[in-house]
Amino acid sequence: MDGEATMADGHADRTPIDGADLCVVGSGPAGSMLAHRLAEAGHEVVILEAGRRFEMDERLEQQEAHIRPGQGNIWEMGGERDAYTSSGDSYYPLNASRVKGVGGSTLHWQGMVMRLHERDFEMNSRHGVGTDWPLDYDDLRPYYAAAERELGVAGADDNPYAPPREEPYPMTAFPPSHSDSLFAEACETLELDMHSVPNARNSEGYDGRSPCVGYGTCKPVCPSGAKYTAEGHVDKAEAAGATVVDRVPVQRLEHDDAGESVTAAVYVTPDGTEHRQTADQFVVAAGGVETPRLLLLSESPQYPDGLANSSETLGRYFMDHLFAGMGGRLDRPTRQNHVGFNTSECHQFYDDTDPVNGLKLEFLNYAGPSPVIEALNGETWGDELLGQLQDSYGSHIAMGALVEQLPQEENYVTLDDSQTDDHGNPVPEVHWGVDDDTKAALERANEVQRAVLEELGVDIEWSVGPDTTGPAYHHMGTTRMGENPSESVVDADCRTHDLSNLWLVGSSVFPTGGAMNPTLTIAALSLRAADALDAVL
């Protein structure tokens, strides 16, 4: 085939591609960005995606489903296909955070993109906790710049706590919101530094996409296309000759007799037909849960505990970021819900050592009820509804925070043999809890939030802290990278220690997670892995 899937009876041809140089499992930002780079370099690339392709002309309909009562689940997650179990001290709501489809979780992500700090790569050396990465910030720095260009990031170099940069952001930052200006008064008094948030959404036309038009429903759906999704790199990969096959969940990876290299990815089409996609090199980019699950499902006599698991760390050290928040009413117009994303943050406490867990403070732009959603979900009409909206809308204000969770061996992803998916495979089990150090950092975040809100004169009505926290849905750490093959799954290039032609990209390779949203680091590592792959193809 020539790299483009043929069409028959209205359905894509889902048979294997002959002579593939590279097979990529997963079409989120990690897989699609890497696939585009290598297809553009002239390699025969095939991408296998478990979910379907969501077309752009569906977005307005999806937005309407989101804001209308009882019509949610716009990304079609759930059911037998997406079954999972949760164990451990804290329940993990896995399907609240992932999308199976072309573009992956960038279809519904918030779009905030920050670089990790220098300390994040050296937590053990500097602070005696966690582990060190097998690379440092300077190794990743040029790839961070490239990732910002690829994603299209709007930002400003106004953060005194950010790591050093080499060039301006591709686009100018979004201006501070009205509520940001209210927070600024209290922060100035308390000597807290506010600064802009880099966002992977267009503040101006960029890469063929329009500027943000202010729909305000960034999460879970952007109808304008101003927010980056990995669909853009999927399209570019296809234009460079790659083949994208959707609705073909990979069931297992097969390897040669010696157990030294992968020979095929076995996938199933919607009609139940099983196929084997062969290639010279294989990349798994299926996220922090499905990547280790696929390797565990690929057990063999040579790898009885899961493929590429000679270290026995596969699935271990699952991490997320924890949320801390606080909010209430202010006797001034706050104009919340006018902006669907954060425009200001504070990283002043990120590098503190007490507690050692990193934390970043967020000044939220979406506290309180949305007038549209409240009206559509309400049971009142006319003057009564108007009075309700006037009373409840525009007077709320809130702060959030992301807190670092350090790697713990007892947090892990494994298989639950007691329950199967729609293909008879054991479902993923997420065993997860929140340790005391993370709770201390959550408490610290709440202390700062309370100080700001009280200084502002807010009547505090709610808080989320150590005893009520929940995840930010950033799955990290389950196929960690490292120099020592007995303590890690992949090396600094994201190639597995055990199999010479198997690479894993995405946040699953993070040895530590910091407190920054992970997508920019995912992209930077994927571009770095693409360079390493190009050298061996």
Image (cartoon, grey):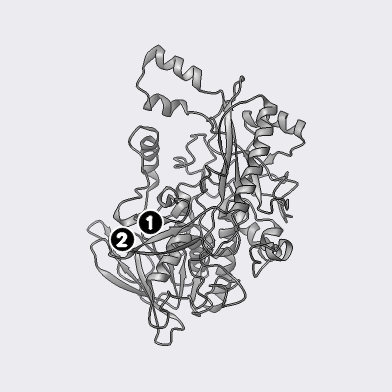
Query: Which percent across, then down, holds residue 268?
Result: 29, 66
Q: Could you tell whether 250 is left or right of 43 in the image?
A: left
Task: Identify which amino acid the numbered label 1 is placed on.
Answer: Thr
Q: Residues within 10 Å of mark 2 (few under 14, many from 20)?
A: some
Q: Residue at x 55, y 67 (%)?
A: 480
Answer above or below: position of 86 versus 38.
above
Q: Could you tell whether 140 is left or right of 471 in the image?
A: right
**Residue receiving disc 1:** 85
Query: Which percent across, then down, holds residue 6?
Result: 30, 63
Q: Is residue 39 visible?
A: yes
For the image shown, how many numbered marks are present on the structure? 2
Query: Which percent across, then down, holds residue 247?
Result: 33, 59
Q: Residue at x 57, y 78 (%)?
A: 485
Task: Identify which amino acid the numbered label 2 is placed on.
Answer: Gln
* Tags 2 and 1 touching, CB below 8 Å: yes
Q: CA distance from mark 2 to mark 1?
A: 8 Å
- Tell which of 258 and 215 is nearer to you: 258
SS of the residue at dot 1? strand
Q: Earlier in the sequence, mark 2 or mark 1?
A: 1
- In the image, farthest residue toward the bottom: 258
For residue 256, which quarter of the picture? bottom left
Answer above or below: position of 372 versus 116.
above
Q: Could you tell whether 456 is left or right of 256 in the image?
A: right
SS of the residue at dot 2? strand
Q: Residue at x 39, y 61 (%)?
A: 428
Q: Is residue 239 visible?
A: no
Q: Residues within 10 Å of mark 1 (few under 14, many from 20)?
A: some
| Label ID, residue 453 | none
Answer above or below: position of 245 versus 308.
above
**Residue receiving disc 2:** 419
